[in-house]
Amino acid sequence: MMKLRVLSSDLLRVCAALAMVLVAVVHVHAAVPNYNPLRDPSFGPIPDEDPSYSDYLGVAPPFPGNLSSPILNTTSGTPGLDDVVFQNLLGAEWLVYNVYQQGVELFNASDFINAGFPNTTFDHIAQIRDNEAGHLRVFQDQISNASVAPGPCK
Ligand SMILES: *[C@@H]1O[C@H](CO)[C@@H](O)[C@H](O)[C@H]1NC(C)=O
Ligand SMILES: *[C@@H]1O[C@H](CO)[C@@H](O)[C@H](O)[C@H]1NC(C)=O
Ligand SMILES: *[C@@H]1O[C@H](CO)[C@@H](O)[C@H](O)[C@H]1NC(C)=O
Ligand SMILES: *[C@@H]1O[C@H](CO)[C@@H](O)[C@H](O)[C@H]1NC(C)=O
Ligand SMILES: *[C@@H]1O[C@H](CO)[C@@H](O)[C@H](O)[C@H]1NC(C)=O
């Protein structure tokens, strides 16, 4: 009987602990309105760590070049001191990235070989494109959550 009572009080304590964890989790979620994973620098390939920013040779746009919209602000606080600077840089990087991405989509390796360029030219254009995608991510990460991170233009 004694054992059972001890057991049930332990059980109660575990339940109470679980309930507290649940409340904490719900609270954290409630404290993060408009959560957007794209705002988290650890989302997706990380510049200077992931090789996709240097040697992906596919035609499909690599992250974050695959985004078609701006990343909206998730808070309405005071913008970061350098947000406007990084918004301008990000806008410029989108232009540069798109030059190379469109090159990858319009041409193939044979086009460059036939035009007299080395047979590595097409792959190098894809790799420069990858590097530019890394720059997009670097600048996205610098913009505070109170400001919009610009997307590509058409
Ligand atoms: C923006 O919020 C995300 C979480 O949603 C956080 O990971 C990130 O560090 C914040 N960005 C800045 C620049 O503070
Ligand atoms: C873009 O790439 C990221 C990372 O691979 C992926 O999670 C996301 O779903 C892609 N978004 C679109 C619109 O394709
Ligand atoms: C984004 O910023 C604007 C301008 O400060 C603000 O009106 C809006 O509420 C913000 N959005 C969110 C989700 O906080
Ligand atoms: C490369 O593109 C040209 C058209 O510009 C096409 O004729 C050719 O078949 C393509 N070559 C390969 C290997 O896809
Ligand atoms: C590319 O050209 C070099 C010579 O310049 C040659 O050795 C190599 O086999 C070629 N590679 C392909 C995939 O055609």
Image (cartoon, rainbow, N blue to C red):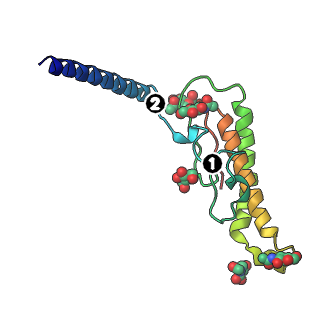
Mark 2, residue position: 33
Task: Kindly tell me whether mark 1's CB lies below 8 Å from ligand 2.
Answer: yes
Q: Is residue 18 above or below residue 118?
A: above
Q: Residue furthest right?
A: 116
The residue at the point 74 percent across, 62 percent down is 126
Residue 12: in sight, yes or no?
yes
Q: How many marks?
A: 2
| Amino acid, disc 1 | Pro
Quadrant location, the N terminus: top left
Residue 116: in sight, yes or no?
no
Label 2 and label 1: CA atoms lie apart by 24 Å
Mark 1, residue position: 45
Task: Kindly tell me whether mark 2's CB lies below 8 Å from ligand 3.
Answer: yes
In percent of width and height, residue 36 lies at 51, 39
Numbered tag placed on residue 75 in the rendering = none
| Amino acid, disc 2 | Pro
